[in-house]
Image: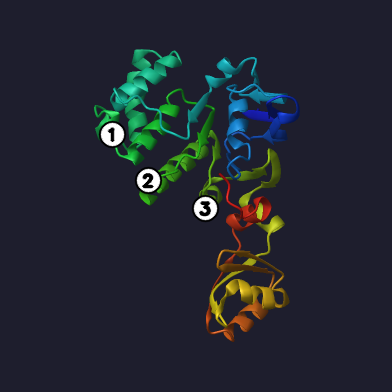
Amino acid sequence: MSPLVIEGLRKRFGQGASAREVVAGLDLRLSPGECFALLGPNGAGKTTTLRCALGLTTPSAGRIQLCGRPVPREARAARERVGVVPQMDNLDPDFTCAENLRIYGRYFGLGDAALEARIPDLLAFASLEGKADTKVPALSGGMKRRLTLARALVNQPELLVLDEPTTGLDPQARHLIWERLRRLASEGTTVLLTTHFMDEAERLASRLAIMDAGRILATGTPREVIAAHIEPQVVEVFGDWRGQGAPAWAAAHAQGVCRRFEVSGETAFCYAEDPAPLLAHLAGEPDLRYLHRPANLEDVFLKLTGRELRD
């Protein structure tokens, strides 16, 4: 059974002419034990989709089934099988690490004996074995994030939902959380995450969806999405060109030596099936510099959602 099924989800805010639809007929079905990444720029509708799925926001239309129960009608019962890591840590600063886990576990009706047996394993999972009696303000940002992840697992959830789980963390903390999430998925926990880090989605997700304006634009494995929506080779061109920048070079020459190009700031992004003609041309432009690489998920994301800044 799928831990989350969403069909025809719509959510509108406001009434009449001022109404704004932020989720527009979204369909989503997760497979047990997979890690699914939901990607999109700010305002794409990701957080609203998660809130509707968890029964925290009432949808305008559509059907949601969470852990086998209809939402929002049976949302409270469904959430007993779900763990949530919010975008911002909301640990209780007055309590120690162990107390945060203990009190949260009681919300799920777990008894003291079960909690005392489970807390050491949760702290070990988060690499916080020596911090059981440490209060939250004394923890680093990475430790707080790991404790929030451990807290979300106190009820041994069928589905773990994470909203931008590694934002603001240093590389060491990010890699540790990635390793823990991969372990959870390998043990059968279904993981649903939103992230702005495309490398995070490529590393973790068995499947993903890119959404914007409340709609799914692409879905599949990371490799499938890249292959379906972007040329396989990218050459980033920057530097001087005849007293001008790379955008001026691109306007004059890029169309003749690559399949497609985009300009962002002082860089021209050239996309090609075969980059050989472009690289040969650039060899004769000593003032230009370039980076040749395979296409990645960020290239697809920017192609589908645009390069303009979102607030």
Observer-nearest of 111 and 137: 137
The span from disc 3 to disc 1 (Cα, nearest Å) is 29 Å
Mark 1 Cα-neighbour bin, 10 Å: few <14, some 14–19, many ≥20: some
Which numbered disc covers residue 199?
3
> Quarter of the image holding residue 38?
top right
Q: Residue at x 58, y 25 (%)?
A: 54
Residue 83 horizontal/vertical position (percent) = 49, 27
Mark 2 Cα-neighbour bin, 10 Å: few <14, some 14–19, many ≥20: some
Q: Give whichever of discs 2 and 3 has the lower sequence position.
A: 2
Q: Residue at x 24, y 27 (%)?
A: 133
In the image, farthest residue toward the bottom: 284
> Could you tell me which secondary element the residue under label 2 belongs to?
helix
Task: Determine if residue 224 is in view.
Answer: no
> Quarter of the image holding residue 70?
top right
Task: Determine if residue 12 is in view.
Answer: yes
Q: Which residue is mark 1?
A: 129
Residue 240 horizontal/vertical position (percent) = 53, 78
Question: Against 233, is 100 above or below?
Answer: above
Residue 310 horizontal/vertical position (percent) = 58, 47
Observer-nearest of 248 and 215: 248
Q: Residue at x 65, y 15 (%)?
A: 73
> Could you tell me which secondary element the residue under label 3 belongs to?
helix
Mark 3 Cα-neighbour bin, 10 Å: few <14, some 14–19, many ≥20: few
Observer-nearest of 235 and 30: 235
Q: Which residue is mark 2?
A: 173
Amino acid of disc 2:
Ala
Amino acid of disc 3:
Asp
